[in-house]
Each structure stands twice: as structure tokens, then as C-alpha cells.
Amino acid sequence: MADLVDYCASIETSSDASPETLTDIQLACAITNSMGAKVDDLATGVDVFFLLVMGSLVFFMQCGFAMLCAGSVRQKNVKNILFKNLLDACGGAIGFWTLGYAFSYSDGPWYIGLKNFALMDMSDGKDYAFFFFQFAFAATAATIVAGTVAERCKMVAYICYSLMLTGFVYPVVVRSIWSPYGWLSKFNQDLFMGVGMIDFAGSGVVHMTGGATALVAAIVLGARKGRFRDEDGNPLPEPHSFPPHSVGLQMLGTFILWFGWYGFNPGSALAITPAGYGDVAALSAVTTTISAASGVVSAVFTNTLIDYIKTGNIEYDLSMAMNGGLGGLVGITANCSVVTPYYACVIGAASGWVYILGSNLLVAFRIDDAVDAIPVHLGCGIWGCIATGIFAHPGLVMKVYSSGGAGIIYGQGVKLLLVELIGVGFVLGWVTSVMTPFFIMLRFLGVFRVDPLEEVVGLDISHHKGAAYDLQAADGDKVDEFIERRSQHGKAPSAPPVPPQSTFAPKVNGGDDDSVPMA
């Protein structure tokens, strides 16, 4: 369409055409210009719609996190964990709206933005859609911590942490890796080490940030009572596990998260109408699917083999399968647009092993993670960034970013891998250096961990006016009465026989056998 408009303009300025011809050409050009404007408006609308739909899918992942966490905790803490997941969305919206978005993407030095706080300078639909999409990512980073600190963290501390993470800590990571100003960004004109860091949808930006925060929080907060020590404080020979109260909710949450990931990864193309963007989104959907499936299979069968070697029994752990799949999703997030489906399978399989290793390390170091969020998001997030430096296809990198860079298996050097490792170190260093003193301060102020008695009773009763489930049984006497009535098949039971009344009554005050007639 642009070429046709340029051609019409050149004809209009030509001196060779007759006046009648020029009139016809001018009319045709006017129609062409009008059509071009409408096509451009349509393309803009489609891109805005695409971003809103993809952002909605990412936000729907909040429901998945809520269901997964609710199913993983004990019955006495269900209300509390659901409330905290709701606060993640609220804290993420307020924190990212007021400060986080401006720190991430507005004009300013390379490390932080200094304009557009509370979206004061924003009025364009494309910009609003972009903010909404980015907010959904910020809320996801915040909610990763919810499951880790479940069953023992105070509400005040939780809302403080959520605001801190989405308003300041996470935005600095975003600016460094995703914004045009970032020193590691692939969108910076001056690419770091000539290649820049590839983290297409956020294995490092989102999942490592949330996972590292969860690790710091778990260490400072401490383990749940009875997890690694008995009532007297003595170490247990074997850590005590707290079984999930609803595996059904866990599975529902896992599938919702997998579904939401199709907004997370393909949606990170940020548009759909420009040439080639549809190819990027479609490939991202395929690699996401393959990696998740490979993570499930890898984790569950590897764990089964380990158990068989230890005990001689063959058992299949559903929790391992679910977390392995989530690990596969995290591992492919950084590189979903720049690896082939074959290597997506390799990345997913390795993610399952990374998850198992990370989960066992937590137990070995006696760090309590109620839902294993740390090995899934931190461990597999690190692996996702490293895998990008190993498997990124040079042709796909050029197609997506219009700049160079390739994984080491393609024989083009180790620059990209080194940049990815530097990015991993930056995220870990930044998050731990800020969040460690923050959590220590909360503990010092006495607002981090709940009272021991409240923890034993359960946070639903101590904090939320009662349990999540009404488990009061029916009255026992009424149940017996109902069973008796049902045994008569709906018919009223027949009255017991009444003995015939005598016409004489016995003497009252003792005496002989004489009887007196009854009145």
C-alpha cells in the first residue's frame, strides 16, 4: 500500500499527463490514500487487540497460581493463600502503575526511568495496551513468592513486599534487559559485547526475579513448624512433609498456568500485523508446548527411576509431573522464539532434571518452600537463560531481533552464552542485595512471621474469621431419624400394639386382692 501511494504521488507531479488524466489520477490517489489510512488504523487496532488478549491470558495465570497454591497448602490455610494471591494482583497493579512502569520504560539514565509516573504522560491506546501487558508480567513475578512463604507469613509483610517488588526491584531488571535504555538489552543501539542479552519472554526478568526473591524470603522467614524440627527444636532425622489438601486444585492450577503461558510467550511478540511477527508468535507457541510436555515426562520418570533404585517400588509422583511441566515452561520462556522444536524438547527435558535437583537441594539445606516455587522459577529460570546461549539459532535470532547472536552449538563463539551468564549474575545480585535487607527489616520490626500459636491453629481461623471449608457434620440424632424413616421406604412406621385396658384398677395403698371398679 505504501508503494502504491508513492507511485500516485509521483504521477501527480508529472508534467506529461493531460489535465483529464491528472484529475482521474488525483481521484485514484485520494481513494488510495484513504484506503491506506484505514489499513493502517486497522493494523493498529489488531495489534492493540492482540496485546490486550495476550495480556488477559497472562493475567489469568493469577487464577492458576491461586489454585495451585490453594491445593498445595494444608486445609487450615486455604483462605490465607487465596487472599495473598489476590493481593499480588492488587499490589502489582498499584506498584507498577505508580512507579514501576515509569522506572522500566520512561526517559532517564540507563539504570532507571524518571518520567511518566502514574501514566501521567500516556494517552495512546497502544501505550495503554503495552502497560497492561507489562503489568500482567509484573504481577506474575510477585505471585511466585506467595506459595513459598505460605502458612507462616503475615499479611502486612506480604503487601509490603508485593509493592516493593513490582514498584522498584522488578522494574530495574526490566529496564536493564528489555527497555531500549538497558545496558544488557537486545533493543539497545549499543549492544553489550556486540550481541546483547536474549530473554524473549522473561526466564530471567520475571521468573528468576520472583524465584530469587522467594529464596531470600524463605531463608529469612524460616521453615514451617514441624518441617525440619520437632516440638522441642531438635532436628528431625527426615524432614516432615505436609501433604497437599487438594490434588485436584493443584492440577487445575497447573493446567491454567500452562494455558496462560500461551499469552506469556507468543504474546511477547507484542504485535501480530507486521511481516514475520505471526511466524514468531506461532513458533513460540509450538516450542512452549513441546518443552512443557518434555518437562513433565522427564521429571516424573526420572523421579520414578530414583525411587525404584532406593526402594525397589515403581510409583509415579503427580506433584513431580506437575512441577516438571511448569519447569519446562519456565525453561523455554527466554528462548521460545529463537530455538527449533527439537531443541525445545531438549530444554524441557533438562528443565525436569533441574527441578528435581533444585528441590533436593532445598531439602538438603533445610529451606522450606511450600510449593517448590524456588526450583521451578529460580532454578529453571537460570537454566532457560543458559539454554539460550547454547541452543539459539542464528537465523531465528536475526529474524526476531535483526541483530546477531547464536548458541554455542552453531559454532559462532561463546559471546551470547557469556552475556546470558552475566545477565543471570546481574539479576541474582540485584534482587538479593535489595530484598535481603528488606526482609530482615520486616523480621526485625516483627511484621514478617505470624505467632507460633496462630501458625499451629491455621491462618484461616486466626486471620480470616474462620476456615475455608464448612466441615460441620449433620446432627447425629437427626441422621439416625432420617435413616429410620428411609428404611420404611417413605411410609410412617406402624404404631406399636396397645394392650387392652382392664375394667378394674389395683388398690392404691396396698391391701388385699380386692379391686375397685375404675371410674
Image: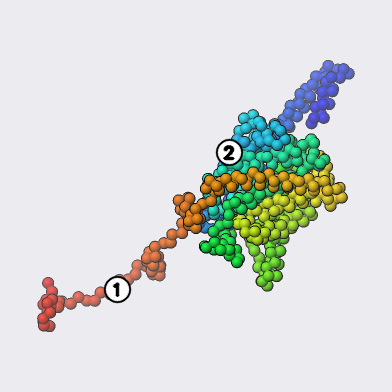
Left of 450 or right of it: where is 413?
A: right
Q: Which residue is mark 1?
A: 496
Callout 1: SS: loop
Q: Residue flagged by tag 1: what amino acid is it?
A: Pro
Which residue occupies the foreground of this view, 469 or 37? 469
Q: Is residue 460 above or below residue 314?
A: above
Which residue is rendered at x = 53% and y = 46% of the image?
A: 445
Q: Position of residue 210 (x, y in %)?
A: 65, 48
Q: Residue flagged by tag 2: what amino acid is it?
A: Ile
Q: Earlier in the sequence, mark 2 or mark 1?
A: 2
Q: Quadrant of residue 474?
A: bottom left
> Mark 2, mark 1: which one is toward the viewer?
2
Q: Quadrant of residue 441?
A: top right
Q: Position of residue 307 (x, y in %)?
A: 67, 68
Which residue is rendered at x = 76% and y = 50% of the image?
A: 386
Q: Which mark is residue 89?
A: none
Which residue occupies the foreground of this view, 209 or 314? 209
Mark 2 surroundings: few (<14), some (14-19) or many (≥20) residues within 10 A: some
Q: Position of residue 242 (x, y in %)?
A: 57, 61
Q: Position of residue 155 (x, y in %)?
A: 53, 47
Q: Which residue is mark 2?
A: 94
Which residue is rendered at x = 83% and y = 48% of the image?
A: 414
Which residue occupies the foreground of this view, 17 or 360? 360
Q: Quadrant of residue 167?
A: top right
Residue 238 seen in render? yes
Q: Is residue 234 above or below residue 96?
A: below
Which residue is rendered at x = 66% and y = 40% of the image?
A: 171
